[in-house]
Structure formats: structure tokens, C-alpha cells
Image (cartoon, rainbow, N blue to C red):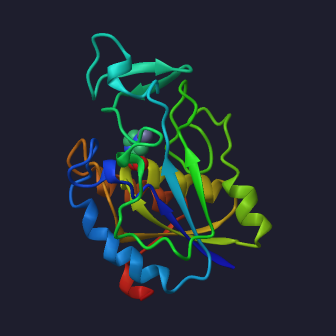
Amino acid sequence: MKALLIVDVQNDFLPGGALAVPDGDLIIPIINGLQQKFTFVVATQDWHPATHGSFAINHTGKKPGDFVKLDGLDQILWPAHCVQGSFGAEFHQDLQKNQWNRVFQKGTDPQVDSYSGFYDNNRKGDTGLSAYLKKFKINEVFVVGLATDYCVKFTVLDALKDGFKTTLISDATKAVNLEAGDFEKALEEMQQAGARIIVSREII
Ligand code: VGL
Ligand code: ZN
């Protein structure tokens, strides 16, 4: 059984949002088209408390792009984004949600970031996504959403680690691109780890 995994298509990651991914909105119609090809669809939602340790504003004298240690891990600091209950944390209104089987929220622990939809960056917290997919006999996932070089990449890598056959649909994802070329670098890393990379017209 296969599932479509939609990562973090939330207002704060879209143009006008707090951590806007350039052209992030262009993937929404592509994802809506893809959803029609799947009977099992799961979404992830970045869902931070206002006190989250990945927010620059919560570290005196730091700004977005600076680094701190968070639970012993190097953590890049972001503008405050996807705060629980805020408009920025909501899914984009044009994204079709009627056929979603479930939403998995991540990044809820203020002391550690969670890029992957499966596990916190320190590997301690588990959203339950892996067990949920296995319960429904899903053995293959197709990953889309935001952002290619952070949450999408780490979701793909964890899917592979947990034994799912994993495909990234490259035109249904956009990168933050803090550095030029981060999109291509992320694709390369996912492919090296065993992911298949395709474009949406191979499915639609
Ligand atoms: C993300 C940075 C911080 C993402 C989430 O969804 O890619 N990036 N939080
Ligand atoms: Zn976040």
C-alpha cells in the first residue's frame, strides 16, 4: 500500500509568511492534483510553542541564521514560525484536506527541533507516524511539501531508515535555499540514501 505524505504546507512557509519559502505556493495545485491519485494521505504540521528553542527571539542577542546548542545539537535559529494556534501554523486554504487520513504535529517540545515528520532531531520524540503507517499496511511513501532542504529531506531520510520504499516528487516541493544550491544538494542527499526522485507528471 502506498501513501502520500504532505509536509508542512502551512501559511508561515508560504509567501507572506514568517519563514516564507520562495515560490512555495506554486506546489499547492500540484499537490492537489497528486492527492487524487492516492487513497491514503497524511500531512505533517510544524506546531511550535511560542517558547520554542529554535526561535531566535528566545535567545538574547541572537538573530535568525545564528547557531545555538539545543539538547546538545547544533541548531540554526529561525524567525518565530508556526506557533500553535496561530494563522501561520494553519494549512494554506487552497490545499485540499478533505481526504486526509490524519495530521501529525511536530516540533512541540520547546527544547528540541523536529524537522522530520517521524522523529525529533535528537531521535527521542516520536510522532507515531511510522507505527501509524505500518498499522495501515503502508510500505511505500511519496513525499511532497516544504521545505525540500529541511523538513522534507529529514522526513524522506527517516522514511528510508524505517524501511519504507520512498519517492520524492521534486516539483511538488520547494527549498528555503539559505545557500544557493541547497535544493539540488538536498535531492542528491536523498537519492544517495536510497530515495527515488520523480516529477509529478510521472504520476498524474
Ligand atoms: C521547517 C525550518 C524550521 C520546514 C520547519 O518545514 O522545513 N524549516 N521549521
Ligand atoms: Zn519549525
Quadrant including the N terminus: bottom right
Q: Residue furthest top?
A: 60
Horizontal arrangement in the rendering, residue 79 relative to residue 52 (left or right): left
**Residue 59 point in image, percent of width and height:** 36, 15
- Residue 68 vs residue 111, the one in the foreground: 111
From this view, report whether residue 48 is shown above or below residue 90.
above
Closer to the camera, 1 or 88?
88
Q: Position of residue 144 (x, y in %)?
A: 44, 66
Q: Quadrant of residue 77?
A: top left
Picture layout, residue 6 above or below residue 18: below
- Image location of residue 154, percent across then percent down: 50, 49
Q: Is residue 185 above or below residue 6?
A: above
* Residue at the spot 49% in from the left edge and 85% down from the top edge: 36
Image quarter hosting the C terminus: bottom left
At x 21%, y 61%, the residue is 23
* Residue found at x 40% / y 43%: 86
Residue plotted at (44% across, 29% down)? 50
Residue 150 position in % (x across, y down): 41, 47
The image quarter containing residue 4 is bottom right
Q: Is residue 136 left or right of residue 165?
A: right
The answer to whether residue 136 is left or right of residue 87 is: right
Residue most toward the right?
135
Q: On the rendering, which quadrant does ligand 2 occupy?
A: top left
